[in-house]
Each structure stands twice: as structure tokens, then as C-alpha cells.
Image (cartoon, helix red, strand yellow):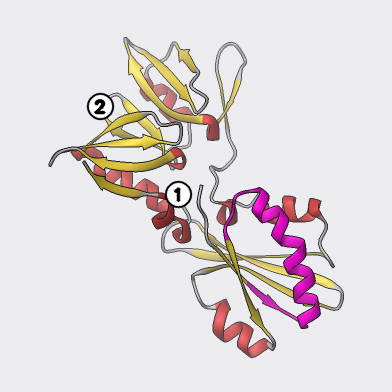
Amino acid sequence: MIFMLKIALYGRLKDQKIIRDALTSPLMENNISFEFYDASNSPEFIKSYLFDNDFRLFIACIDNMTSYIIRSYSDANDSHLIFGSMSFPPTPDEIKEKLLKNHDLSGTCPHGEYIIKTKLKIRHEDIEYINAENGKTIIHLKNGDTETVSKRMSNVANELNGKHFVRCSNGYMVNVFNVRKIHKVSKDTSKIELVSGAEIPLARSYTNVFFEAYSLSIPEFDRLARLKMLDE
């Protein structure tokens, strides 16, 4: 996955360097591309960055504490700020728990599990798509495995997160977080290429529903980097 996370830093230059060093390795290990932007004074920090919607993470080093603000989106137009603090410099555990597990910063599928009758728990993020077959539902995982559920797809859909699992054609639902590309096949037909390389149909009648769900789920800074529409 490709991300571009803009991070605004405020504090003394030597403190900013310590924060940069603390964040760089965890961000790289989680495949999050990032850019640091510095502010040497409070007015510059607020005027240049805090009201710029392209920035999702703000960090200030004050009085031997690391304060942070995360800009979070509940939908495409409604954002709110999450405030918190860490030690200075922040520990790897603090960075993981307070920053990297936040969906708005990582761009990952929010945590959830689907439990089938065998009591097997399947993480939402591992599900690429589901399809209906003879009154049952086939769950397709990123690793290529499948699980069959003796329920209609509509029933399974009601048990999944409707914001992230969306119909893309008759008999198919896709996890928008595992979409890699959209290939245009004809005027009325496209196909979705998934992270695993599997391809499923995207019908014209479901295109608007799919892109609406995608735009509401994937952080704005990451949409264009992750999804490409290709003509074949």
C-alpha cells in the first residue's frame, strides 16, 4: 500500500529531530510514506498547518511531553480532532498504540472479525471479497483460501461492516480496503483488481455505490495514490 502522511512538527529544532528519529522507523516498517513539516513558532504552526486538511497528524514538543492531534474523518465532509499525549521521546509502544493503530493515519481496514460456525474468526482486513453461490456465501481471503458459509450473501452482508464491504455486481461484494486497481473493459463493464491479484466484475449499475463507499472509507490523502483506473 502507498500512503503519503503529512506530519506537522512544532518545538525546538533539536526536539523536532528527536521526534523525527522516533517516528521514522515505525512508519517505514508499516509501509507508510510520510513527510515532515516544521514550524518554529505557534502562529506559524496554526496558520500554516492546523487548518490545512492535507495534514492528518500534528505533534508539539512542549515541557518534556509529546502532544499530538489527529485529524479524523467520520465521512468525506465531517472531520474532528483527536487530542492526546505521549512521553518525550515517545516509546515504540506509545507510537504503535496511539498513532499507528489509528485508521485515519494508517489507512488500514478498521478492525473487525467475522465468525463462522466452526468458530473460526476471520479478520475483516483479510477478506478480499465474497460471492453468492447456490444459496451459500463464499468468503475469499487475501492468501487465496476460501471459506463457505451456509447463509445467503445478504445475511452475511448484514453481519459485516456495510461501510467497507460493498456490492460491486450481482452476487459480489468487495472489501474496498483490498482494491488495487479498476480496469475499464467496456462502456458498461469494468473489473476490480484486488491486492492478491484476483479480479472480480464491477457492473455499471453499482459503480456509483462502489466509489461512494471507497471515498468514505479510504483517507483522502491516500485515494489517488492507491486506486488507478486503467483502460484496457
Q: Residues within 10 Å of mark 1 (few under 14, many from 20)?
A: many
Spatial CA distance of label 2 from label 1 is: 22 Å
What kind of secondary structure does the magenta stretch mostly adopt? helix
Contact between labelled residues 1 and 2, with CB atoms less than 8 Å apart = no
Please state if 185 lies on the left or on the right of 63 as rendered: left
Q: Determine if the magenta segment contains residue 145.
A: no
Q: Amino acid at mark 1?
A: Ser
Compare marks 2 and 1 and give the one earlier in the sequence. 2
107 vs 86, left or right, is left
Residue 92 appears anywhere in the view = yes
Query: Circle 2 is placed at which residue position?
Result: 170
Residue shown at 60% from the left, 83% from the top:
46
Q: Which residues are the magenta region?
A: 8-33
Circle 1: element type: helix
The percent position of residue 53, horizontal first and vertical second, equals 49, 71
In percent of width and height, residue 205 lies at 19, 38
Q: Is residue 166 visible?
A: no
Q: According to the image, label 1 marks what residue?
A: 217
Q: Position of residue 124 (x, y in %)?
A: 54, 33
The residue shown at (39%, 57%) is 224
Whole-percent x, y for residue 23 in the image: 72, 61
As drawn, which residue projects farthest toward the front? 232
The residue lying toward the viewer, choosing from 131 and 150, is 131
